[in-house]
Image (cartoon, rainbow, N blue to C red):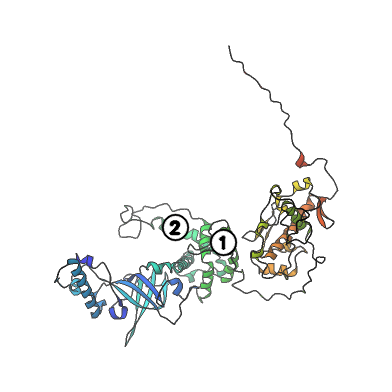
Amino acid sequence: MALKDLLKKPFGPYEEKEALTDKVPNSTPLNPVELHEVILEWGGKYTGLTECEDCMPENRTDDSAPRRFMGTLLILSLSWLTQEAVKQIEKELSRRDRDARSANNPGPISLRSMYSKGGHLKVRVTIMGKRHLNVKYLDSTPVPRGLMMISKVETGHETRYHRYAVASLHIYSYELSRLYLSRFRLYHILTKLIELDANSNTIAANQTPLATRTPYWFVDRYMEHMAYRGSQRRHRAIYASSDSDIESGTEGTMRGSREHTLRHVSRAEVVSKIAEHAEWLIHQTEQIQNGKLFDVKVWKRWLPRVRCLRMEAAEAGRTWGVWDGAELPVNDDMDVDDLSPPPPPPPKPKKRKKKLTQRRPASASAQANAHASSSRNPALPVPPPVDADEASDSDVSMNMNPTMQRDYDSDFSPESSEDDPPSSDSDGRPPRPISPVDPDIAALMPPSFRRRPNLTATGKWACDVPHCRYSIDLLHPREEDFDTEELTESEKWRLHRRTWKFGDRWIDDALARMVGKHHEQHLGEWGIMLVDRDGEPMLKWKDERRKKSSLLRKVKQDDRRITEEVKQEDE
């Protein structure tokens, strides 16, 4: 077997302090000292950068056990190895040669003679050592385009440090480091955008105020400086060394003046990439004293919208703003104000006794919505409004009937009988209205008037009346949205402070009352009023007019006569 085949498998593993000397240089951009297939270990178990770096919220390490590593190093000079290591490697090399030759007395192989020839044959050694400090990724002068790791070697009389460039990670450690690498790649891109915007190589040269550097400011800079820049047209990220249009000896640079067409990059895609690590970017920037990338307060105000868009995309079966290795929970229980606790709430008013006669009636339109929905689905009447002070932790989405958000056809719903018990959410009254809705009135009312309003994942509701642009945004409420006596002061305060969660029962009821107030305005514009008849709401015309024939009952008859013409054939 040829000697190069005997050297394919690394030798070792050996302890770094026993195998390497102080002649091993530190890695530099021009002369990198690279470790390959690095495995990270803590407490006797495999780990990764996501779990063992101090800047990661997922950090599980502590000072009780040292953080260790194991990797393969190419020995460029024999002076890097101790004498004991040289003997061990020569012994192992002779054993490999003996097993390959199947000879009784193979000739000895000397590393000194192999290295003295100045050839390309070198040995690779697997070393184990103790890590020192945190790693640096895309943020170090010695290893500007990669991952730098420092080891600590403690001997009886001295302590020395080796600086390595990590060329590759073992698959186990890589899987547990993907999140770390993805976050710092994004952080590096944002840093470069600030530098490119100032036409400098430092972020300090950029005089743009931190408050102006919103996520969309970075999107604009990316589209301007990185998305379609000329250098990217002359570089191919995925290539084969045999490609005729790739310059030999380069990492994907195209030959001569050749360029290739870049794919289209949308702004929404760039925003999604930034949103993937928005929480971590804010956390990381808070830890920096000098050289902050943006104003943390501005980005915190952006977080609620990011979380809403994530949930809305998940409900649509898509992924937005979520790292590809993460899972988005179905019910996001993170509160909007998790990062900054809200101020203490105002003093609670005295609770009223729950009596049927003292219950505050719903608005006229809200009652109309409730009974219109009941007429379509008698088994599911609209529950009465719940006061914010009376709402408890149990009034969450777990107790919310999901069928309340569905629309039912009366043709497929059974009729209610007098013997049927009232619904648990009802107040004991018959679920169906006494009088049916006038067909002419029903023709004017959109379908949304007949069911409870649905709150989207973005916290918005929009009116579907033609030419009406009114909408409600619970994440950014306006004073006009609260212009109804159906909302208590406590509910208004909670809506202003956004101390609510999606799926809370009281927020759905509050939205129904705000929508009902707006629907009342449309009913007034159409000349419709809602009156109470024996405790039941009924819609009627303000001027008491009744059309003799309903528009819904008008059927246009086809009175055209079909005359059959028979063409006579020529005899």
Q: Are marks 2 and 1 in contact (CB under 8 Å)?
A: no
Local crowd size for mark 1, using a 10 Å CA cut-off: few (<14), some (14–19), many (≥20)? many
Say how many tags the image has.
2
- Which residue is depicted at the point 82% across and 42% down? 547
Mark 1 residue type: Arg
Nearer the observer, 215 or 275: 275
Q: Which residue was labeled with disc 2?
A: 229
Nearer the observer, 531 or 417: 417
Vertical placement of residue 517 versus 29, above or below? above
In the rendering, at what x and y percent does residue 475 appear? 65, 64
Q: Quadrant of the C terminus?
A: top right
In the rendering, at what x and y percent does residue 392 appear? 69, 70
Structural distance between the alpha carbons of marks 2 and 1: 30 Å
Q: Which residue was labeled with disc 1?
A: 310
Vertical placement of residue 567 versus 131, above or below? above
Point out the tag, 2 or 1, that comes first from the N-terminus.
Answer: 2
Nearer the observer, 14 or 373: 373
In the image, farthest residue toward the top: 571
- Name the secondary structure under disc 1: helix
